[in-house]
Amino acid sequence: MKKIVSILNAIYLATAPALAIYLLSNGIQFNWILIAILFFLNIIVGNVPGSFKNRKNEFFWFLIILVLGFIGAIINTEIFYDNILFWHNLAGIVFFFIALINFTTYCNINVFIKTLYFIGGAAAVICIFQRAMLLITGAFFSNFFIPWLEVNRDIETLTENRVSAFFTEPAHLSIFLLPVFYLALNNKKFLLAVLYAAGILFSGSTTGFILLALLLLVFLGKMKIKKTTRLLLAVLLIFTCFIIFTYFPDVFFDNFDKLSSTDSDSKRLLGPLSYIQLFENYQIWFGVGLNQINGFLKMNGIIVTNDYGIVKNANYANSFLYMMLSYGIVGLFFYITYLIKTIRTHKSDIGFVIYAIGILASDQVLFNRNLLYVLTFLLFSSYLLTLNKKIE
């Protein structure tokens, strides 16, 4: 029974970024139901005590976040604080840490890897198909979502040229594919790596484009491979780039254009840093609360809009900055401390470290399925690159 549960844990961890975008008909997150059922199975087979023993860093970080969350609620509640949102966020945090602490402790690594390869392959093929259709016909089929579940984002808000397979945006597709690409490279599955790389390029994600190049350089720099293997890899890469550049040149041009137009004021980078000038001293230390930026800005007479005057959700920043906005300097300190301890404790591979830092510094992946996915690669790093090892 324990082996079955470890397999289910592995499948969940590998599919969480794709499955966590859905809602049930009553608005409850489908992801929460999955975690609750799986956690119950882990309790039945006696997995829970061992997870607290093996994931002390994660459990300590969980306690810190709980304390900081209640401090933020207390110091801000009479000003602008949304208490209903606080309890909803708290539920999400609890489910996140259940998966991070328990499911990663008892996970069949072989099943995890095979699931990654399968889902990654499907996502890459669909993305390539979508981009090809867009370039050839000017439109593409976008609804590759599970039909009987509600997507936790209005599909109509997606622009017509943002292909993303069965994810809600290109950045999330790249977050999923990047470590799978690097994993395939390290396990010398070069044809699969080329497929994943093409999926990342065709998605048009700027973050994916940059990290794809960095991960390739890391692999070539650290791996001791035969000259024939290195030559084969170089030929595959050149051939792939030639095909894409010949038949789909816009894939490269779009990525370079987006890269050149990105500046430090972007909301993904340092744009929201300007909010801190509105903070009181105690808010600088303890923040304004998770996902409470919208209410805080409205209290200060600020409505965030895009270039077309449409009101946007201000609860967005890269994860480092968003941690500081939500939990202050204290929260950011413990966040960075946790990451450093994780990398040291699990001897995380440099490629997965670069991937994690790149995603955390460019996307809001705080206490959601994407942060769980990113941290999983730091925790499993030494196992993922040695296929004959398992965590069970």
Image: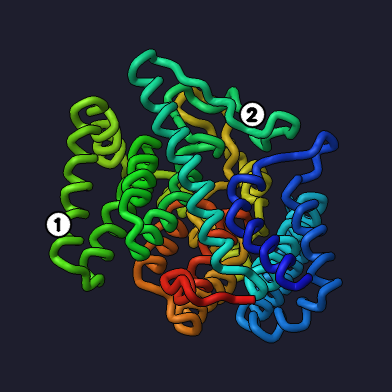
| Mark 2 surroundings: few (<14), some (14-19) or many (≥20) residues within 10 A | few
Q: Is residue 178 left or right of residue 141?
A: left
**Residue at the location (73% across, 74% down)?**
67
| Mark 1 surroundings: few (<14), some (14-19) or many (≥20) residues within 10 A | few
Instruction: For mark 2, give the secondary structure.
Output: loop
- The x, y position of residue 205, in whole percent, is 38, 41
> Quarter holding the C terminus?
bottom right
Front residue of this view, candidates 243 and 35: 243
Q: In the rendered image, which quarter is residue 359 located in?
A: bottom left
* In this rendering, the label closer to the viewer, 2 or 1: 1
Q: In the rendered image, which quarter is residue 129 located in?
A: top left
**Above or below for 220 versus 81:** below
Q: Extreme top residue here?
A: 137
Q: In the rendered image, which quarter is residue 167 located in?
A: top right
Q: Is residue 233 left or right of residue 209?
A: left
Q: Is residue 232 left or right of residue 36?
A: left
Q: Which residue is mark 1?
A: 231
> Quarter holding the N terminus?
bottom right
Q: How many marks?
A: 2
Q: Which residue is mark 2?
A: 154
- The x, y position of residue 171, in whole percent, is 46, 43
- The x, y position of residue 244, in whole percent, is 24, 33
Residue 375, visible in the rendered structure: yes
Q: Quick one: label 2 or label 1, which is nearer the N terminus? A: 2
Please state which amino acid type lies under the numbered disc 1: Leu
**Residue at the location (77% across, 61% down)?**
38
Front residue of this view, candidates 179 and 209: 179
**Residue at the location (71% across, 76% down)?**
63
Disc ID at residue 22: none
Please state which amino acid type lies under the numbered disc 2: Asp
